[in-house]
């Protein structure tokens, strides 16, 4: 009895493996082609430009403070306490500029994540829909990670593009 069950499993397993459908999709190409991605990139560039402009203003202030400090530093009649205070002002302002730069980078990364999450979800949903409609067992990203792709693997990128209306 046990041998018959094993024999039935051994016969059914290769048949079920043959019935499986596999697909690959170029996620990067589809993601880049989505209009939402273009809108996201535009918004990120605009926000980045605002941060860059503000950074340049802050940098100019630091440069002016430093130039003023150098002028005072060269003057032998200026007391040491004034020189130290001016140096401290330059160092404090420089630290604020660096803090601004770090905050700006964090804000931009957070904004990119916030804007890309719904786009990635829409892409994932389209891939799942193509997989369900086409009866695929697996759809894997075709990002060069696969060392070999057999002839029975289907590139579903055009189907995903169609599903997204691209």
Image (cartoon, rainbow, N blue to C red):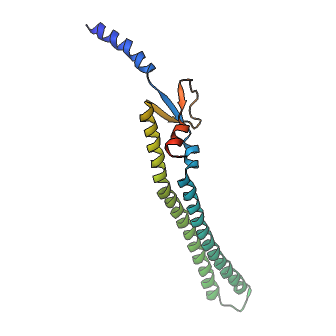
Q: Is residue 47 left or right of residue 63?
A: left
Where residue 40 sits, quadrant-wise, is bottom right
Question: Looking at the image, which residue sits at the far bottom?
Answer: 77
| Figure check: 52 above or below 145 | below
Quadrant occupied by the N terminus? top left
- Residue 22 at what x, y percent from top left? 49, 28
- Counting from the top left corner in percent of width and height, residue 16 is at 40, 19
Q: Which of the two residues, 80 or 41, is positioned nearer the viewer here?
A: 41
Task: Report the label total.
Answer: 0
Give how far across and how far down residue 105 sits, in percent.
55, 63
Q: Residue at x 59, y 77 (%)?
A: 93
Q: Taking 116 as reference, is 96 above or below it?
A: below
Q: Is residue 14 above or below residue 72?
A: above
Q: Quadrant of residue 81?
A: bottom right
At horizontal 58% and vertical 55% (from top left) the residue drawn is: 38
Whether residue 48 sits left or right of residue 138 in the image: it is right
Check the image and report above or below for 32 versus 80. above
Which residue occupies 73% across, 88% down?
75
Percent position (x, y) of residue 113?
49, 56
């Amino acid at each position: 009895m046990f041998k018959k069950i094993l024999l039935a499993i051994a016969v059914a397993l290769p048949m079920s493996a043959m019935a499986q459908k596999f697909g690959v999709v170029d996620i990067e190409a589809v993601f880049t082609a989505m209009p939402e991605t273009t809108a996201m990139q535009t918004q990120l560039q605009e926000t980045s430009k605002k941060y860059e402009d503000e950074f340049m203003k802050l940098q100019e202030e630091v440069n002016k403070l430093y130039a003023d400090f150098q002028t005072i530093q060269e003057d032998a009649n200026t007391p040491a306490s004034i020189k130290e205070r001016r140096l401290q002002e330059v160092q404090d302002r420089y630290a604020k500029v660096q803090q601004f730069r770090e905050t700006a980078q964090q804000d931009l990364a957070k904004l990119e994540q916030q804007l890309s999450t719904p786009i990635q979800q829409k892409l994932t949903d389209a891939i799942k829909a193509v997989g369900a409609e086409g009866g695929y067992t697996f759809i894997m990203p075709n990002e060069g990670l696969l060392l070999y792709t057999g002839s029975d693997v289907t590139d579903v990128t055009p189907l995903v593009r169609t599903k997204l209306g691209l």
